[in-house]
Amino acid sequence: MSIFHKAQEALQDTAFIWWDEMKQVVKDEGVLIFSILVPLFYPLLYSWVYNNETVREVPVVVVDDSHSQLSRQFVRQCDASPDVKILAYASDMDEAKSLLSRQVARGIYYLPSDFETNVNRMQPATVGVYCDMSLMMAYKAVFQTAQTVTMEMGSEIKTKLGGHYTLRDEQIAAQPLAFEEVPIFNPTGGYGSFIIPAVLMLVIQQTLVLGIGLSAGTARERNRYRNLIPISRHYNGMFRIVGGKALAYFMIYAVMTAYLVLVVPRFFGFTAIGRWQDLLLFLLPYLLDCIFFGMVVSCMVRYRENVMLLMVFVTLPLLFLSGISWPQTSIPGFWQGISWLFPSTFGIRGFVRINEMGGTLLDVLPEYQILWVQTAAYFILACLVYRYQIILARREARERLAEMKSHSAED
């Protein structure tokens, strides 16, 4: 057979596999939901929930045992901040803790009876801050507001007691070293801009694995692998099978990925300063890596429901292991090694550095190279596991044929 005929046969086999897989995506409701509907609507819902970016007007209850002009000034300045809202005054700590336990309030400001007295005696005065730690954003708002107000009041008191003659002397005494806080990469300090990019990359991987796993589970239950036996006579046939299936999901997720990384962040106003050329080059190996990874995982589960349980179980750990919500250097070495098995680990790190920090492909070259290495490794594994599935299907077909022959001989 000439090279031309071999190439023609390879293209025909690959096109057959591609068309069969595309039909299964449309016919199977589960695959259709996870491959198209979830990537379309789930990021919109997630982004809409965190669209406010920061927590404002956190309710706080005050216990003022000082009843002084200075304590009232502290409460007024806290209430005037955008992050805290003074909900009520409590008569004692027991009443305040009751409001906190019922989540009517998220924090307590306690001003002791000697608050102003200690200031007048030139002694340190304390403010008790009790926070609900179940919600970190609320804790941050309550604690930082109290800290900022105490620092400002301390500077004012220091200026008054300094005996300075000019306004400039007072400014220098209040703030000997001036500093300017400039948040980089996340100017609003919002939670959405911080977490959404990582979630978008994780959505690509998880939905791909779920869609491919459901399709493979259905094929295994209905023994559709028998249809692939004529194509799988040699290892070249495995390349055609894996290539045809990968092409089907690549065509679908090329559109879904462009929607997730280009449309969703800009629609909600999240930080997106990366060049589209760098994003395109980086997302190419990531998408291929996720596809081949999903094909390998799909052959490790027997029933289609199992892949759903598996992906739901590992979603949150993968987000933590990516080094976004917890510093990468603080993750134990064993768990870092586990995280290297998943495409999302390096995909999230590289995407955040390009899209959020304005990096280029050279800045994420280690992640980029690792994604290509994973792509090659998972492609080879996918070919091997699919060949094993075809061998099992072929063996089962032979056993059924032998059984039919034995029954016909008896008749």
Image: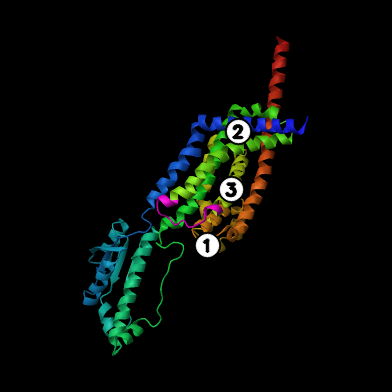
Sort mark 3 into few (<14), some (14-19) or many (20+) by Cα contacts within 10 Å: some
Establish if 148 lies above or below 192.
Answer: below
Q: For residue 271: magenta? A: yes
Q: Residue at x 36, y 81 (%)?
A: 175
Label 3 or label 1, whichever comes before in sequence order: 3
Q: Amino acid at mark 3?
A: Leu
Q: Which residue is mark 2?
A: 18
Provide the residue span drawn in magenta.
265-277
Establish if 188 lies above or below 374.
Answer: below
**In the image, residue 16 lies at what x, y percent?**
63, 29
Q: CA distance from mark 3 to mark 1?
A: 26 Å
**In the image, residue 61 lies at what x, y percent?**
27, 64
Residue at the far right: name it. 1
Q: For residue 259: magenta? A: no
In what element is the residue under mark 2?
Answer: helix
Sort mark 2 into few (<14), some (14-19) or many (20+) by Cα contacts within 10 Å: many
Q: Quadrant of the C terminus?
A: top right
Say if mark 2 contacts mark 3, CB within 8 Å: no
Q: Which residue is mark 1?
A: 327
Establish if 395 lies above or below 70.
Answer: above
Q: Residue at x 68, y 39 (%)?
A: 383
Q: Which mark is residue 284?
A: 3
Q: Amino acid at mark 1?
A: Pro
